[in-house]
Each structure stands twice: as C-alpha cells, then as structure tokens.
C-alpha cells in the first residue's frame, strides 16, 4: 500500500492521548491516527447514506431511530462478545 507523508499539528493533550493509545494497542502513532481517520471517514459515509435515504424515503421517526439504536447496541454487544474490533 502506498503512503503519503503529511505534517500535522495536534493539541498537546490529544497527542499525548494518541501516544498512550497507540502504545497500548502496540501500533505506531501514525498507524493509530490512520485507523482513527478511517473510522471517521466510514462514519461520515454512513451519515451521508442516511441523509440520502431520508431524502428519498422521508425522515426517520423518533420510534424508528430508537429501534435502530436498540439494534445497533445489540449488534455492538454481539461483536464485542466475539472479540471483533468495534
């Protein structure tokens, strides 16, 4: 995989926390930031998908949102019990 080097500036507190988290996970600072950026991009893609769906189907009702949150929680608990990274 090709990589692109960038110079970034982080708040001191954030940089210290990233350093700790990366060390705890046994990965480099750059690898940890790369994973965090990938997760954020997936989240944004999902949010855009919801907006696109709501434009076609109408906004989700509070009940539909609540049901979705219950389902998401159940899926996350199941994934964690399997040892998946979530």
Image (tube, rainbow, N blue to C red):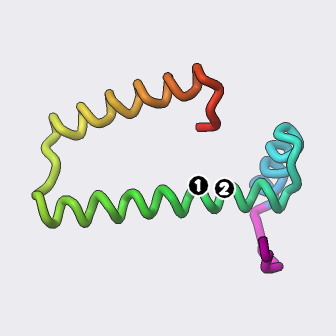
The residue located at (26%, 63%) in the rendering is 51
How crowded is the residue under tag 1: few (<14 C-alpha within 10 Å), some, or many (20+)? few
SS for callout 1: helix
Residue 60: x percent and y percent?
Answer: 16, 48
Q: Where, by quadrant of the figure, is residue 80 drawn?
A: top right
Count how many numbered circles sit on residues in the image. Answer: 2
Asked if 68 appears above or below 56 in the picture, the reply is above
The residue located at (50%, 23%) in the rendering is 78
Residue 25: x percent and y percent?
Answer: 82, 40
Residue 29: x percent and y percent?
Answer: 85, 57
Using residue 65 as the reference point, say whether residue 43 is left or right of it. Answer: right
Majority SS type along the magenta span: loop
The N terminus, quarter of image: bottom right
Asked if 64 appears above or below 4 in the picture, the reply is above
Q: Where, by quadrant of the figure, is residue 28 drawn?
A: bottom right
Q: Which residue is mark 2?
A: 36
Q: CA distance from mark 2 to mark 1?
A: 5 Å
Residue 39, numbered label = 1
How crowded is the residue under tag 2: few (<14 C-alpha within 10 Å), some, or many (20+)? few
Q: Where, by quadrant of the figure, is residue 41 drawn?
A: bottom right
Q: Which sits in the foreground, 13 or 33?
A: 33
Q: Is mark 2 in CB contact (under 8 Å) with mark 1?
A: yes
The residue located at (33%, 34%) in the rendering is 69
Q: Which residues are magenta?
A: 1-11
Residue 12: x percent and y percent?
Answer: 81, 59
Magenta stretch contains residue 68: no
Magenta stretch contains residue 6: yes
Q: Residue at the front extreme? A: 1
């Amino acid at each position: 995989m090709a990589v692109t080097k960038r110079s970034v500036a982080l708040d001191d507190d954030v940089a210290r926390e990233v350093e700790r988290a990366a060390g705890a996970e046994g990965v480099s600072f750059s690898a940890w930031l790369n994973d965090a950026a990938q997760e954020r991009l997936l989240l944004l893609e999902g949010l855009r998908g919801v907006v696109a769906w709501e434009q076609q189907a109408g906004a989700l009702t509070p009940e539909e949102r609540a049901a979705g949150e219950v389902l998401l929680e159940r899926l996350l608990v199941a994934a964690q019990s399997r040892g998946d990274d979530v």
